């Protein structure tokens, strides 16, 4: 392949005329990205808490469905004393269900690692099924709010 000096000089002149970004332009881009991150990050960081609340609501709906099946088979819900464990293992205390079967393989924990609470008769309906939220205390707001089968 033959080296052509003329073409090479022409290419170098063209290449030298191309201009890159200045330091100021790069700094402006960095500042814009930092401002965008400051606006967007708090919204993204809040999502795990929202996901936990949704998971708790879905677990409550699944347990409620299992309670409905228990009632269809046995004509009553488990007592407060029998608790949600009656959905996993056959109760040994009265009233002992005649047509019991396993309704759940295991009882899920709430997203914060606590047991779901079950009371019959409930204050909000036939039964109350709920979690106390992240703080483990009644009431609260946001991530600390009590989430129950009445929050539909």
Image (tube, rainbow, N blue to C red):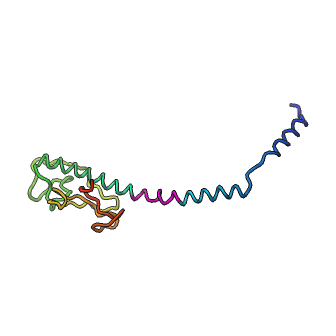
Q: Does 22 sit left or right of 91 as displayed? A: right
Q: Residue at x 18, y 62 (%)?
A: 123
Quadrant in the picture for residue 146:
bottom left
Q: Residue at x 27, y 53 (%)?
A: 152
> What predominant SS class does the magenta segment belong to?
helix
Percent coordinates x, y for residue 103 in the rendering: 21, 48
Percent coordinates x, y for residue 51 in the rendering: 38, 55
Q: Residue 136: within the magenta? A: no
In-front residue for pair 10/63:
10
The vertical placement of 1 against 82, above or below, is above
Percent coordinates x, y for residue 134 in the rendering: 34, 64
In-front residue for pair 92/19:
19
Q: Residue at x 24, y 52 (%)?
A: 63
Q: From the image, which quarter does the N terminus lie in?
A: top right
Q: Residue furthest right?
A: 5
Q: Does 38 sit left or right of 113 as displayed? A: right
Q: Residue 44: within the magenta? A: yes
Q: Residue furthest top?
A: 1
Quadrant in the picture for residue 28:
bottom right
Quadrant in the picture for residue 81:
bottom left
Query: What's drawn in magenta, residue-wise?
Result: 39-49
Percent coordinates x, y for residue 90 in the rendering: 15, 53
Q: Does 45 sit left or right of 56 as displayed? A: right
Q: Does 47 sit left or right of 17 as displayed? A: left
């Amino acid at each position: 392949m033959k080296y052509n000096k003329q073409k090479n000089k022409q290419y170098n002149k063209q290449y030298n005329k191309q201009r890159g970004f200045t330091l100021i332009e790069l700094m402006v881009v960095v500042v814009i990205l930092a401002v965008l991150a400051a606006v967007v990050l708090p919204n993204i960081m809040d999502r795990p808490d929202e996901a936990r609340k949704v998971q708790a609501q879905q677990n409550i709906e699944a347990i409620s469905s299992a309670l409905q099946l228990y009632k269809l088979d046995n004509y009553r819900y488990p007592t407060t004393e029998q608790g949600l464990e009656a959905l996993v293992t056959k109760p040994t205390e009265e009233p002992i269900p005649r047509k019991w079967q396993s309704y759940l393989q295991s009882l899920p924990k709430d997203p914060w690692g606590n047991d779901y609470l079950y009371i019959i008769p409930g204050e909000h309906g036939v039964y109350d099924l709920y979690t106390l939220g992240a703080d483990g205390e009644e009431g609260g707001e946001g991530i600390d709010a009590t989430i129950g089968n009445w929050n539909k």
